[in-house]
């Protein structure tokens, strides 16, 4: 018997088939009456079929694959009219009010999806995302770790990040060659008052662009001369906490 849809390697598609795991992921969202939910990459509907039946919530999905769009509409009538057929990286805000995001994120664009969540940060109250385990651990990593990097700092400046649990390859079709991990991001409402995200992002990217060098060398062309005498300049990017990056941004940019 042929499958009702094809799996596209070009889109990084690994579909969940383990029902217990699907339920466990869906259960991680904080549900309240009137809650708005956006599922990114619903694929074959593994999570969607549980999300669309939750009472008193609004649901939308963003899917780039037209074949999956038609499959979902034909298979789950309740989802009709709720799927936005678009690349999430090009999508505009799906709601005017705040909303939560959930998804088994395609591995090949999982980091860009998190940058998109940062772009939407003022309206995204929570993200429950599945990533390749290494990427999930990298986002959740703290200072001093080799895994700590640009996405760790930028995400943790705006969200509380919590690694929830592993997902084994045999939960997917086809099974990926790596472990996966589910992470919760809870919006902490810009506690550092970062007003110019573009400048903050530039600083963090420049610092980690030459992560083996001290910040004095890595940031020499980005910061004014006065900054180069700061004691933080003796450190490398991976040694700085989020608050240290905020201090450099506020003081010198």
Image (cartoon, helix red, strand yellow):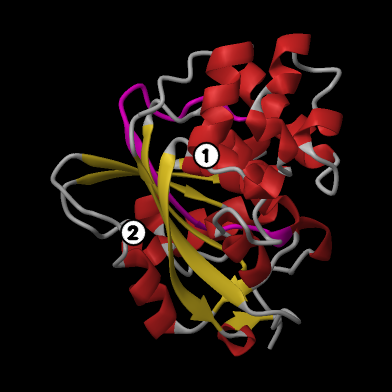
Against 56, is 42 above or below?
below
Q: Position of residue 78 (x, y in %)?
A: 34, 53
Q: Is residue 233 visible?
A: yes
Would you say 2 lies left or right of 250 here?
right
Q: Position of residue 59 (x, y in %)?
A: 34, 45
Against 46, is 32 above or below?
above
- Cβ–Cβ below 8 Å for labels 1 and 2? no
Q: Give the quadrant of the N terminus.
A: bottom right
Q: Earlier in the sequence, mark 1 or mark 2?
A: 2
User: Dividing the picture into quarters, in which one does residue 116 lie?
Assistant: top right
Residue carrying label 2: 51
Q: Residue at x 32, y 30 (%)?
A: 98
The kind of secondary structure element at disc 2 is helix
Q: Residue at x 46, y 61 (%)?
A: 183
Q: Position of residue 81 (x, y in %)?
A: 43, 40
Q: Give the quadrant of the C terminus.
A: top right
The kind of secondary structure element at disc 1 is helix
User: Residue 80 — which label?
Assistant: none
Q: Nearer the viewer, residue 184 or 148?
A: 148
Q: Point out the stretch of residues depicted in magenta.
A: 90-107
Q: Is residue 64 visible?
A: no
Q: Position of residue 175 (x, y in %)?
A: 69, 83
Q: Local crowd at mark 1 within 10 Å, few (<14), some, or many (≥20)?
A: some
Against 138, is 111 above or below?
above
In front of the other: label 1 or label 2?
A: 1
Residue carrying label 1: 242
Q: Measure the alpha-carbon separation of dots 1 and 2.
A: 34 Å
């Amino acid at each position: 018997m042929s499958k009702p849809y094809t799996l596209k390697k070009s889109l990084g598609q690994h579909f969940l088939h383990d029902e217990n795991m699907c339920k466990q992921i869906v259960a991680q969202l904080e549900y309240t009456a009137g809650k708005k939910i956006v599922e990114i990459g619903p694929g074959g509907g593994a999570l969607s079929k549980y999300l669309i039946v939750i009472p008193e919530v609004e649901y939308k999905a963003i899917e780039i694959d037209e074949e999956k769009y038609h499959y979902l509409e034909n298979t789950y009538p309740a989802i009709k009219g709720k799927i936005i057929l678009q690349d999430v990286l090009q999508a505009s805000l799906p709601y005017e009010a705040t909303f939560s995001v959930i998804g088994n994120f395609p591995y090949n664009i999982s980091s860009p999806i998190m940058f998109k969540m940062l772009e939407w940060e003022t309206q995204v109250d929570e993200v429950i995302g599945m990533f390749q385990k290494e990427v999930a651990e990298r986002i959740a990593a703290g200072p001093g770790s080799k895994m700590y990097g640009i996405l760790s700092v930028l995400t943790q400046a705006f969200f509380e990040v919590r690694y929830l649990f592993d997902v084994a390859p045999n939960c997917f079709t086809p099974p990926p060659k790596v472990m996966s991990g589910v992470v919760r991001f809870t919006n902490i409402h810009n506690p550092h008052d970062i007003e110019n995200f573009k400048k903050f992002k530039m600083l963090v990217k420049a610092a980690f662009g030459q992560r083996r060098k001290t910040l004095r060398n890595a940031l020499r062309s980005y910061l004014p001369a006065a900054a180069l005498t700061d004691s933080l300049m003796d450190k490398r990017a991976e040694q700085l906490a989020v608050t240290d990056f905020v201090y450099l941004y506020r003081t010198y940019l």
